[in-house]
Amino acid sequence: MLVGRKVKVLLKDVDRVRWRQDLQEDRNRLATLLSAAEQISADRDAKLAALRKLIGDKATQPINTGNKKVIIFTAFADTAT
């Protein structure tokens, strides 16, 4: 029986002990990344704070009277949200 997409491997040739160790290591690394990501919030985001300040400054002190428009470009939907 073969497994894999690009590279096919016979299951009988798989070192199951090492494979399990590798999977456990991957799981631990992902858990560490998730824990670090969960600590990030809008309150701790320096770039977001700077953007909010720029928008606030534009709203209170526009370069051209009455022009309070701001356009923000981003490639990521999560960033836009």
Image: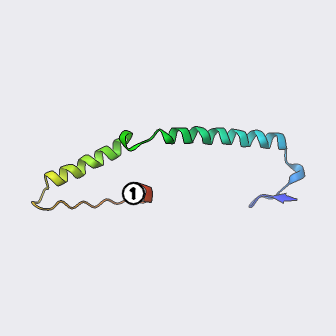
Locate residue 29 relative to residue 43 in the image: left or right. Answer: right
Question: Nearest the camera: 54 or 37?
Answer: 37
Residue that mark 1 sits on: 81
Locate residue 51 relative to residue 32 in the image: left or right. Answer: left
Which quarter of the image is occupied by the C terminus? bottom left
Instruction: Residue 20 in the image: state x and y as whole percent.
Output: 78, 42
When asked about the image quadrant of residue 42, the answer is top left
Kindly identify the amino acid type of the residue bearing the numbered disc 1.
Thr
Instruction: Residue 54 in the image: state x and y as whole percent.
Output: 24, 49
In the image, residue 30 above or below residue 71 = above
Instruction: Residue 72 in the image: state x and y as whole percent.
Output: 31, 59
Locate residue 78 relative to residue 23 in the image: left or right. Answer: left
Residue appearing at x 83%, y 40% in the figure: 17
Binning the other alpha carbons within 10 Å of mark 1 as few (below 14), some (14 to 19) or many (20 upward) gives: few
Q: Secondary structure at mark 1?
A: loop
Residue appearing at x 88%, y 59% in the figure: 1
Residue appearing at x 88%, y 49% in the figure: 13
Instruction: Residue 79 in the image: state x and y as whole percent.
Output: 41, 54
Locate residue 63 relative to residue 13 in the image: left or right. Answer: left
Residue appearing at x 58%, y 37% in the figure: 32
Q: Is residue 32 visible?
A: yes
